Image (cartoon, rainbow, N blue to C red):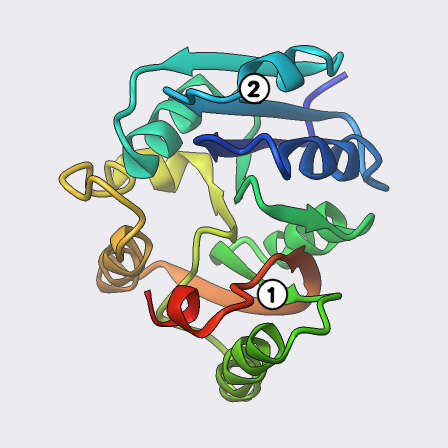
Amino acid sequence: MAITASIIIPTYNAEKTIDQCLEALLNQSVKPLEIIVMNDGSTDNTQKIVEEFKGVKLVNQKNFGPAVERNMGARLAKGEIIIFIDSDCIADKNFVKFMLEPFQNKEICGVQGSYRIKQQELIARYTQIVIEMSYEKMKKQEFIDHIGSYAAAYKRKDFLELNGFDESFPKASGEDTEFSYRMTEAGKKLVFNPKAFVYHFHPTTLMKHLK
């Protein structure tokens, strides 16, 4: 049976959240899925935890940063559609279904999903409100010019043709924005689907939020 999509998760010291992330992905309403964890030189129990999950491919590498890990995962992937999700995100059971839905339109090359939270802390709720303000603007646009890699889907062919994320970014610091602009400049159409959502653990203190 052909793989419906390949999900790529860059991880670094994600022992607190990676189990919840993988459990949610293994229970998606759409199957079969290829799940690839790119372990970016973790020094905690991330590798040990991932190894306990059957049906998950683990790739251990030195600490290169998320841009390198995502690109490497994309090259290894077997699916025509690649989906990126962060290790501190918990996907809704229909996340993959709704990420794939826009690709029924052959012109679409990239899809942005959305954040939700279950947290009650004031700073986390404030962060979510700010994010949702941008979502409201995106909902009004037929096409968007930016996709955040926490919930992103691309046609693998287009992703690789444009050489993926800029690997000169050593940390998660805008490589997804830069790639989005390259896609739109190349005439690729990107869309926002808020129905494809993941729960995220936002910062709960002001210092972490500002950082």
Under circle 2, the secondary element is loop
Residue at image point 57% right, 27% down: 79
Residue reaching furthest left?
168
Quadrant location, the C terminus:
bottom left
Residue at the spot 44% in from the left edge and 17% down from the top edge: 76
Dot 1 falls on a residue whose secondary structure is: strand
Question: What type is the residue that disc 1 sits on?
Answer: Ser
Residue flagged by tag 2: what amino acid is it?
Asn
190 lies left or right of 4? left
Whole-number angstrom distance, CA of label 2 to CA of label 1: 28 Å
Name the image quarter holding residue 98. bottom right
Q: Which residue is mark 1?
A: 114
In the rendered image, residue 20, in percent from the top left (x then y), is placed at: 73, 38
Locate the N terminus by quadrant: top right
Of residues 204 and 35, the one nearer the viewer is 204
User: Label 1 neighbourhood size at 10 Å, few (<14), some (14-19), many (20+)?
Assistant: many
Residue 13 percent across, percent down from the top left: 47, 30
N-terminal of the pair, mark 2 or mark 1, is: 2
Q: What numbered label is drawn on residue 45?
A: 2
Q: Residue at x 65, y 18 (%)?
A: 49
Q: Nearer the viewer, residue 204 or 56?
A: 204
Which mark is drawn over residue 89?
Answer: none
- Residue 138, x across and y down, in percent: 50, 81
Q: On screen, 38 above or below 106?
A: above
